């Protein structure tokens, strides 16, 4: 128990004793977390927007004109059995005709000859999908329902959106992995400089019989504390940066979906704090290893 207290005491003492290197390590970890985290959050929001576009891409099923409106509505029971359908809206052909008149405005006179008795429009169902990747299969299931005359769906647009999403996800993943590796390399070398400045201190401890872990623990605690501090500071910096980027993006791209930071706050804090601790401990353990054989 006394050794445990000694480790913590020495760990904090090292932080203040080598203040400049401690500040440098914290700044480096904050920069790496912000760079990697911001790219990840941007990628996540873009992925959400692409998913929303996919889901909002509607499929329209036109009902056989020989069916009455009541019979057409009854097809909704069959459509409800299709798993991949997120929402179903029935559009009455007479209501559709009136809405079309309103859309035409001053040109609505061209529809004066059409009434409910000779309405050229058909009753229809409008669908959105849970998983746009299954659009082709779902369209086939809708077409198979008895009473459906034809289905209108922009399958090529859905396919392109899915392709864009996959490509962007691969690019984002490659960027995050690359930035993470660069971050670990920079942090390890920053801590290594701090270890190099203390090589004589480590050599003296070895000469008086201290075990490797007795020497190592204060550095591990130092790295953990610095990493945790950097993670918390990076979280607050990300909060401000994310909010500013969200405001700018909202004004420039009105239809771009930005998830509020409040929805991500605890997740980002946990990830940044955890990553900071891992970076700090990993950098300390990796860097001190070469100085254990002095």
Image (cartoon, helix red, strand yellow):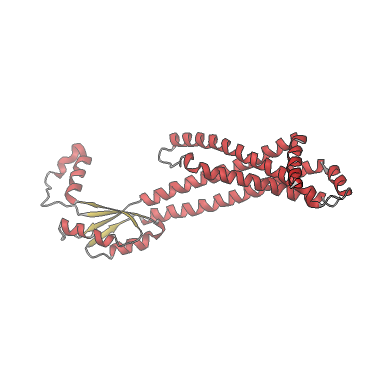
Quarter assignment of residue 101? top left
Q: Is residue 2 toward the left or the right of residue 274 in the image?
A: right
Residue 231 vs residue 189, the one in the foreground? 231
Q: Residue at x 61, y 51 (%)?
A: 177
Q: Is residue 289 toward the left or the right of residue 275 in the image?
A: right
Q: Residue at x 44, y 34 (%)?
A: 251
Quarter assignment of residue 150? bottom left
| Residue 249 vertical placement versus 87 (above, below) | above
| Residue 108 vertical placement versus 163 (above, below) | above
Residue 84 vs residue 54, the one in the foreground? 84
Provide residue 7's location: percent of width, then percent of height: 75, 44
Residue occupying the far front of the picture: 1
Residue 130 vs residue 63, the one in the foreground? 130
Q: Is residue 115 toward the left or the right of residue 227 in the image?
A: left
Q: Is residue 142 toward the left or the right of residue 106 in the image?
A: right
Residue 182 visible to the viewer: no
Provide residue 259's location: percent of width, then percent of height: 46, 42
């Amino acid at each position: 128990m006394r050794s445990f207290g000694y480790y913590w005491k020495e760990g904090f003492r090292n932080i203040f004793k080598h203040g400049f290197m401690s500040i440098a390590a914290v700044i480096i970890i904050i920069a790496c977390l912000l760079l990697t985290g911001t790219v990840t959050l941007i990628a996540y929001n873009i992925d959400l927007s692409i998913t929303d576009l996919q889901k909002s891409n509607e499929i329209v099923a036109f009902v056989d004109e020989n069916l009455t409106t009541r019979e057409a509505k009854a097809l909704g029971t069959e459509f409800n059995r299709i798993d991949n359908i997120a929402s179903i809206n029935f559009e009455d052909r007479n209501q559709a005709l009136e809405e079309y008149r309103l859309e035409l405005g001053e040109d609505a006179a061209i529809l004066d000859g059409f009434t409910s008795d000779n309405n050229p429009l058909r009753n229809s169902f409008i669908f959105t999908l849970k998983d746009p990747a299954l659009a082709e299969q779902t369209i086939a299931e809708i077409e198979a329902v008895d009473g459906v005359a034809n289905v209108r769906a922009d399958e090529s647009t859905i396919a392109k959106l899915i392709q864009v999403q996959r490509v962007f996800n691969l690019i984002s993943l490659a960027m995050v992995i690359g930035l993470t590796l660069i971050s670990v390399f920079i942090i390890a070398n920053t801590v290594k400089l701090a270890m190099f400045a203390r090589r004589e201190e480590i050599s003296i401890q070895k000469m008086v019989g201290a075990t490797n872990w007795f020497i190592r623990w204060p550095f591990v605690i130092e790295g953990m504390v610095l990493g945790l501090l950097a993670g918390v500071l990076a979280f607050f910096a990300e909060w401000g940066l994310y909010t500013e980027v969200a405001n700018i993006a909202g004004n420039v791209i009105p239809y771009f979906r930005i998830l509020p930071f409040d929805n991500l706050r605890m997740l980002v804090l946990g990830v940044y704090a955890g990553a900071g601790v891992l970076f700090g401990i990993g950098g300390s353990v990796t860097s001190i290893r070469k100085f254990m054989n002095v």
